[in-house]
Amino acid sequence: MGASYSRSEGHSDVIAAFYDLDAISKYNYLKITKCDTIAKRIEGAFYASYSIQSPAIPTVFEPKKVTFSSGRFWANTQ
């Protein structure tokens, strides 16, 4: 399993930068905090660090690393 992140420009049809999950970061996690089988919904928290893959030379608009901390999510399940 993996994760990626991209930043787009214009009308979101041009990818300006592409990042892959920093697999060596000891801080990355995805934690399921609630699983409701009746409502078919899960909730959780995450921390994820990504390292730039493209463009090869980052600019002020494309940093070498992007981190999402104190992230929360929910999803409907089937």
Image (cartoon, helix red, strand yellow):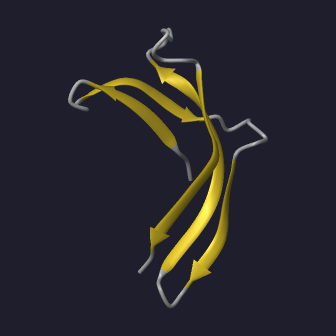
Residue 16 vs residue 47: left or right?
Answer: left
Number of numbered labels in the structure image: 0
The C terminus, quarter of image: bottom left
In the image, residue 20 above or below residue 16: below
Residue 77 vs residue 30: left or right?
Answer: left
The residue sitting at 50% across, 91% down in the picture is: 38
On the image, the x and y values in percent for residue 24 come to: 73, 35
On the image, the x and y values in percent for residue 73 come to: 54, 59
Residue 76 vs residue 32: left or right?
Answer: left
Closest to the observer, 55 or 71: 71
Closest to the observer, 31 or 51: 31
On the image, the x and y values in percent for residue 37 come to: 54, 87
Residue furthest to the right in view is 26
The residue sitting at 50% across, 8% down in the picture is: 57
In the image, residue 38 above or below residue 40: below
In the image, residue 8 above or below residue 30: above
On the image, the x and y values in percent for residue 70 come to: 66, 47
- Quarter-of-image position of residue 55: top left
In the image, residue 43 above or below residue 3: below
The residue sitting at 45% across, 76% down in the picture is: 77
The residue sitting at 64% across, 34% down in the picture is: 22
